[in-house]
C-alpha cells in the first residue's frame, strides 16, 4: 500500500471511531472528551497512543484523578449500573516507568454503529407511518385570489395642495401672510426688495 492510502485508511478509521463514540448512549460527555483527546495522540502506523495523564489533564483542564477515573471507565467492561458492556479502550503499561499505552477497540464501535442504524430505521419507519396516517390535500396557491402587489392602486399625492398652506406654492403662501410678523413675511419683504 502507498503512504497516501495508508493515511486515508487511518483517517477513515479515526473518523469512524469518533462517530461511533459520539452516538454511544452509554458514553458521558466527560468520557467522550477524554477519548477524543486520546484519539488525537494515536500513531497512524501502530494505532496506539501514549499520552501521559498529566498531558491529558492539562489539555482538558481537569485533575489527574478525574482523567484516571475517566480512562478507567473507558477501559471497563462493566457499566456504572453493573450491566456488562464492551470497553472503548485497552490500557496497558509495559513497566512502571513507561507511559500508559491506549488502543481503541473496534468491537464496541461496531456494536454502537449497528444500534444507531437500527434506531434510524425505526425513526424512518415511524416517519412514514405518520405521513401515511395524515392524508395530504392538494393546495392550490396559484389560483387563489389575493392582493395585487405588483400593480398597487395609485393615489394622486403630488398634485394635491398641502392643507396648511393657503397658496399652492411656498412663494404664494409667503405673500399671503403679509406682514404678520412671522419669518415668512420677512422672507417675502426681502424677496420684494430684491425685485
Image (cartoon, grey):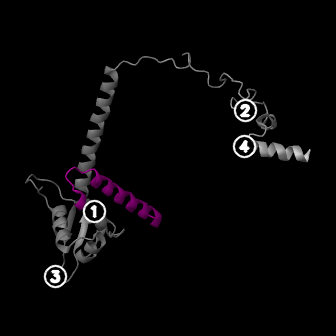
Q: Which residue extends farthest front?
A: 180
* Residue bearing mark 1: 33
Q: Are marks 4 and 3 in contact (CB under 8 Å)?
A: no
* Callout 1–callout 4 Cβ contact below 8 Å: no
Q: Is residue 7 magenta?
A: yes
* Mark 3 or 1: the one toward you: 1
The residue carrying pointer 2 sits among few (fewer than 14), some (14 to 19) or many (20 or more) residues within 10 Å by Cα, namely few
Which residue, given by chain and number where applicable, does mark 2 sit on? Answer: 165
- Find residue 57 and report its image quarter: bottom left
3D distance between C-alphas at marks 1 and 4: 79 Å
User: Can residue 50 be seen by looking at this rendering?
Assistant: no
> Residue under circle 4?
182
Residue 28 appears left or right of 132: left
Instruction: Residue 22: give x, y in percent of width and height.
Output: 29, 53
Q: Please tell me in which quadrant of the rendered image residue 74 appears.
A: bottom left
Inter-mark Cα distance, 1 to 2 = 76 Å
Instruction: Name the residue: 34% across, 55% down.
Output: 16
In the picture as drawn, the residue positioned furthest to the right comes out as 195
Crowding around mark 3 (Cα neighbors within 10 Å: few <14, some 14 to 19, many 20+) is few
- 136, above or below 6, in the image: above
* Cα gap from disc 3 to disc 1, whole angstroms: 26 Å
Element type where label 2 sits in the image: loop
| Residue 194 position within the rendered picture, expressed as x and y whole percent measured from the top left | 90, 47
Image point (20%, 65%), residue name: 90
Q: Quadrant of the N terminus?
A: bottom left
What range is drawn magenta here? 1-30
Q: Which mark sits nearer the N-terminus, 3 or 1?
A: 1
Whether label 1 touches label 2, CB < 8 Å: no
Amino acid at each position: 500500500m502507498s503512504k497516501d492510502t495508508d493515511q486515508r485508511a487511518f483517517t477513515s478509521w479515526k473518523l469512524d471511531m469518533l462517530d461511533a463514540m459520539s452516538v454511544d448512549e452509554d458514553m458521558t460527555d466527560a468520557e467522550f472528551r477524554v477519548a477524543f483527546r486520546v484519539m488525537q495522540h494515536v500513531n497512524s502506523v501502530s494505532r496506539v497512543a501514549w499520552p501521559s495523564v498529566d498531558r491529558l489533564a492539562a489539555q482538558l483542564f481537569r485533575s489527574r484523578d478525574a482523567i484516571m477515573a475517566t480512562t478507567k471507565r473507558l477501559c471497563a467492561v462493566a457499566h456504572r449500573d453493573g450491566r456488562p458492556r464492551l470497553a472503548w479502550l485497552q490500557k496497558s503499561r509495559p513497566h512502571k516507568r513507561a507511559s500508559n499505552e491506549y488502543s481503541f477497540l473496534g468491537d464496541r464501535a461496531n456494536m454502537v454503529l449497528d444500534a444507531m442504524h437500527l434506531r434510524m430505521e425505526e425513526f424512518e419507519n415511524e416517519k412514514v407511518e405518520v405521513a401515511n396516517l395524515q392524508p395530504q390535500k392538494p393546495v392550490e396557491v396559484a389560483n387563489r385570489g389575493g392582493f395585487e402587489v405588483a400593480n398597487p392602486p395609485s393615489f394622486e399625492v403630488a398634485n394635491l395642495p398641502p392643507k396648511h398652506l393657503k397658496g399652492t406654492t411656498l412663494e404664494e403662501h409667503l405673500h399671503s401672510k403679509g406682514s404678520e410678523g412671522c419669518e415668512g413675511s420677512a422672507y417675502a419683504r426681502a424677496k420684494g426688495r430684491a425685485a
